[in-house]
């Protein structure tokens, strides 16, 4: 493997001059820079990032722990994180926790052992808070993403309660629905709990008694939701259904298909999150779209400021606003 000395010898300059060109630490005359760049290509020299990181007590890497990167919202957040990280010259190490607290704790341990410069975490439903706190106490900057909990760390997410309240009130006031089911999923997840609160607030404001049999909880997985919603749709058909996540939305639509039901003919339907290109579905699906890419980018920007020390204030919580688009699935016209 070629060394920086090999490059310097071929270019006829000192190793420090080569270093200035590689790292951009000092201006170098254009003619000299060209000779050095030609020598780098000729020798096949590659910078030893590990050695450089050790000298700087940095690894130029951050860890990102998500519950399921295949979910559209999390995938978009990951892209937002990666865009900002790459712009800052950092590598993102990704781990999937699979909604498993033990896997999350293990991922935290592994990434900490790799001495990442910072961590972004979307906590699982029953996260071991002490594991996250231990990493923070060790001095590693941490930003919670999407799911906010009691950890003393920066947090970036979306408004959940008010948009869900607005969505349900739209079904009541615009379309006259009074029996509205909620496909909630796992209410131990902070985002789902907040969305359930918005649903309840809307019913209270509309003067509608809460029917707990119309609130479908469980694991939040699509197959589990499908089974539970099949029972609800078969036995006590609500006039409208609101899903709290993409997974529960899939479960609701699968249950409807299994029973030969369609929206909005048999029941109105709306969801939080939804699917990519929701406007291409027929009927178009009414959805609350969170700015997932922006959430990831904002979280990474915040982490970068913690890493470089430019942000030293107490932990901050940032909530971004989602956008509601009303389409045919809830009874609106195209």
Image (spheres, rainbow, N blue to C red):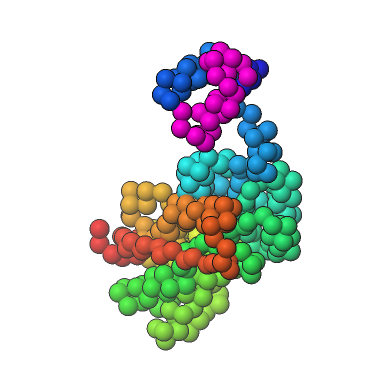
On the picture, is 180 further left or further right than 135?
left
Q: Does the magenta stretch include residue 133?
A: no
Quadrant of the snapshot with the N terminus: top right
Q: Is residue 15 above or below residue 247?
A: above
Residue 217, given in percent of the width and then of the height, sits at 59, 67
Q: Is residue 132 above or below residue 172?
A: above
Q: Nearer the viewer, residue 155 or 261?
A: 155
Q: Does the magenta stretch include residue 22?
A: yes
Residue 308, given in percent of the width and then of the height, sits at 57, 52
Q: Which image quadrant is residue 323 in?
A: bottom left
Q: Is residue 265 visible?
A: no
Q: Which SS type dominates the magenta stretch?
A: helix
Residue at the farthest left position: 333
Residue 33, given in percent of the width and then of the height, sits at 46, 23
Q: Give the range drawn in magenta.
A: 5-28
Q: Which of 85 and 46 is in front in this view?
A: 46
Residue at 49 percent across and 34 percent down: it is: 26
Residue at 67 percent across and 34 percent down: it is: 50
Q: Which of 120 and 277 is in front in this view?
A: 120
Q: Can residue 170 be seen in this view?
A: yes
Residue at 43 percent across and 63 percent down: it is: 320
Quadrant of the snapshot with the C terminus: bottom left
On the picture, is 251 further left or further right than 95?
left
Q: In this view, does 35 lie above or below 54?
A: above
On the picture, is 183 further left or further right than 279?
right
Residue 22, given in percent of the width and then of the height, sits at 53, 29
On the picture, is 170 further left or further right than 56?
left
**Total labels drawn:** 0
Residue at 69 percent across and 38 percent down: it is: 54
């Amino acid at each position: 493997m070629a060394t920086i000395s090999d490059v310097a010898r071929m270019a006829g300059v000192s190793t420090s001059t080569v270093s200035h060109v590689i790292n951009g630490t000092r201006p170098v005359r254009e003619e000299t820079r060209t000779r050095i760049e030609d020598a780098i290509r000729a020798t096949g020299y590659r910078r030893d990032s590990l050695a450089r990181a050790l000298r700087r007590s940095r690894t130029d890497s951050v860890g990102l722990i998500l519950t399921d990167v295949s979910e559209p919202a999390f995938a978009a957040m990951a892209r937002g994180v990666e865009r900002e990280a790459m712009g800052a010259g950092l590598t993102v190490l990704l781990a999937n926790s699979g909604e498993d607290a033990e896997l999350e704790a293990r991922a935290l341990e592994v990434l900490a052992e790799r001495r990442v410069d910072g961590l972004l975490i979307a906590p699982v439903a029953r996260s071991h808070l002490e594991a996250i706190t231990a990493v923070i106490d060790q001095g590693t900057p941490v930003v919670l993403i999407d799911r906010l909990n009691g950890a003393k760390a920066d947090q970036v997410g979306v408004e959940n309660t008010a948009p869900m309240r607005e969505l349900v009130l739209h079904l009541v006031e615009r379309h006259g629905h009074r029996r509205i089911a909620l496909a909630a999923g796992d209410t131990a997840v902070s985002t789902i709990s907040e969305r359930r609160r918005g649903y309840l607030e809307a019913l209270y404001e509309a003067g509608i008694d809460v029917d707990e049999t119309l609130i479908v909880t469980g694991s939040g997985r699509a197959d589990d939701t499908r089974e539970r919603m099949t029972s609800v749709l078969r036995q006590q058909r609500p006039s409208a259904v609101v899903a709290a996540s993409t997974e529960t939305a899939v479960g609701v639509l699968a249950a409807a298909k299994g029973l030969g039901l369609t929206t909005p003919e048999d029941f109105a339907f709306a969801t939080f999150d939804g699917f990519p290109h929701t406007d291409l579905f027929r009927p178009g699906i009414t959805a609350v779209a969170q700015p997932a890419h922006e959430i990831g980018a904002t979280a990474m920007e915040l982490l970068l400021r913690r890493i470089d020390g430019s942000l030293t204030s107490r932990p901050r919580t940032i909530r971004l606003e989602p956008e509601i688009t009303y389409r045919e699935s809830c009874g609106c016209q195209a």
